[in-house]
Image (spheres, rainbow, N blue to C red):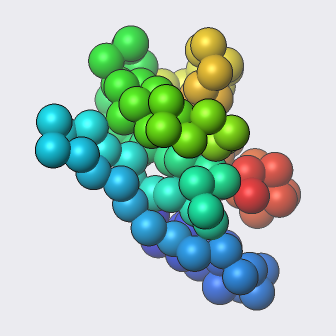
């Protein structure tokens, strides 16, 4: 999360950073801009379907959002509409301007 805050600050971005939570316990750790990017952060070594619940629920309300899940799973890949990033790959993509 701090890396996202740092990137937004150093890049002089006007994008806002918030989170999203529902009464039925769906959540997204970081929402950038007006639902432009939804980022869920998990401390798992292996991403499974349940880990994507928050960003997929968010995308139902905001269909144009870019869905991202960051974890310790070492294989960055796409799973359905969700981009799965190994944490260091995410940092590289963030600072290269590929996320926002």
Q: Quadrant of residue 77?
A: top right
Q: Which residue lies at the image location 38% right of the left edge and 13% below the top edge?
A: 48
Q: Tell me if residue 14 comes above or below residue 66 in the rendering.
A: below
Front residue of 94/55: it is: 55
Q: Which residue lies at the image location 46% right of the left edge and 57% below the top edge?
A: 30
Front residue of 68/74: it is: 68
Q: Tell me if residue 3 comes above or below residue 26 in the rendering.
A: below
| For residue 96, side relative to residue 94 (left or right) | right
Q: Which residue lies at the image location 64% right of the left edge and 29% below the top edge?
A: 83
Q: Quadrant of residue 97?
A: bottom right
Residue 42 percent location from the top left of the image:
36, 38
Q: Quadrant of residue 80?
A: top right
For the C terminus, the image quarter is: bottom right
| For residue 25, side relative to residue 32 (left or right) | left
Q: Tell me if residue 21 comes above or below residue 97 in the rendering.
A: above
| For residue 25, side relative to residue 78 (left or right) | left
Tell me if I can see residue 93 in this picture: yes
For the N terminus, the image quarter is: bottom left
Q: Which residue lies at the image location 73% right of the left edge and 51% below the top edge?
A: 99
Residue 23 percent location from the top left of the image:
15, 44
Report how many numbered discs are placed on residues in the image.
Answer: 0
Residue 47 percent location from the top left of the image:
41, 19
Tell me if I can see residue 69 in this picture: no
């Amino acid at each position: 999360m701090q890396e996202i805050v740092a990137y937004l600050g150093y890049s002089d971005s006007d994008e806002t950073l918030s989170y999203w939570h529902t009464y039925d316990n769906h959540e997204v750790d970081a929402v950038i801009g007006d639902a432009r990017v939804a980022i869920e952060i998990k401390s798992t070594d292996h991403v499974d379907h349940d880990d994507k619940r928050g960003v997929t629920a968010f995308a139902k309300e905001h269909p144009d959002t870019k869905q991202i899940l960051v974890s310790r799973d070492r294989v960055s890949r796409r799973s359905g509409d969700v981009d799965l990033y190994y944490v260091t790959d995410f940092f590289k993509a963030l600072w290269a301007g590929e996320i926002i």
